[in-house]
Image: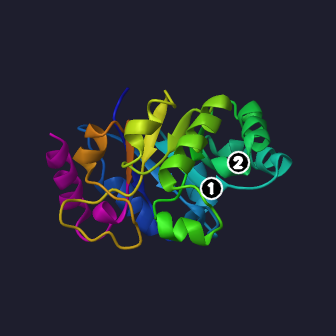
Amino acid sequence: MTKNIFIACDTNDTKKAKEIIKKTFTKKLNIGYKFGLEFLNSKQGRIFISKMKNKIIFADLKLHDIPNTCASTINAIKDLKINYLTIHISSGLDALNAVKKVSGKIKIVGVSTLTSLNNKKLKQTGHTKSIRNLVRQQAKLATKANLDALVCSPHEVPYVKKIFKKEIITPGIRFKGEKAKDQKRIMTPKQAFKNGATSIVIGRSITQGNIIKNIQRLIKSLS
């Protein structure tokens, strides 16, 4: 599989998004752009994405609702010609199946357990399983629903890839020496790919500060 780099455009400012896209252009990496709820719900966000040409677009909606609502959302966003769209695996098998049924050319990505959680914070939500066991169960469900890709932290990839045989996307990526900030389970880009990830999501490490220098650092770190 091709190693994909998804740049997280975590902003509601279309000028900033345009700057990120322009300054991260390189033929040395296979780059796509991830837009989350902050951007997709902004006044100009949807219009901006509708005008994007020849880019890999990752709509990180993280759907989590009843099957009919999830499926209806897919149909409502199809005009944007996006490539990837996320749904929480914890929405349940019926919702995953409903979304997959209407997805068309959109790759449906199952989100396992957020990288902002550790075992302590997971227990606060009422879960009794460890992250390891929960993610393993979520990977089985994603396989059963025939999802196109799965999101998990780079730490879970070694055992997830034994269960889920398609694209594995890992957020929680930081350059060596960077602070984790609001993420709990992190790795460097090189470590994540070495651990078995097929795609990584990297945001602030690239988009904050000197974007051109940051993307050059990423290229160098993966060489």
Other residues around mark 1 within 10 Å, as few (<14) / some (14–19) / many (≥20)? some
- Left or right of 219? Residue 118 is right
SS class, disc 2 = helix
Q: CA distance from mark 1 to mark 2?
A: 10 Å
User: Is residue 212 covered in magenta?
Assistant: yes
Q: x and y percent of residue 63 in the render?
A: 68, 54
Q: How many numbered marks appear? A: 2
Between 100 and 23, the one lying in front of the other is: 100
Residue 221 versus residue 105 in the image, above or below: below
The amino acid pointed to by label 2 is Ile
Is label 1 in contact with label 2 (beta carbons under 8 Å)?
A: yes
Other residues around mark 2 within 10 Å, as few (<14) / some (14–19) / many (≥20)? few
Q: In the rendered image, which residue does mark 1 sit on? A: 61
Q: Quadrant of the N terminus?
A: top left
Q: Quadrant of the C terminus?
A: top left
Between 40 and 154, the one lying in front of the other is: 154
Q: In the rendered image, which residue does mark 2 sit on? A: 77
Q: Identify the magenta region.
A: 202-223
Q: Residue at x 52, y 70 (%)?
A: 121
Instruction: Identify the disc placed on residue 155.
Output: none
SS class, disc 1 = strand
User: Is residue 149 covered in magenta?
Assistant: no
Q: Residue furthest right?
A: 68
Q: x and y percent of residue 167 in the render?
A: 47, 33
Instruction: Point out the frontmost of discs 1 and 2.
Output: 1
The amino acid pointed to by label 1 is Leu
Q: x and y percent of residue 65 in the render?
A: 77, 55
Between 142 and 58, the one lying in front of the other is: 142
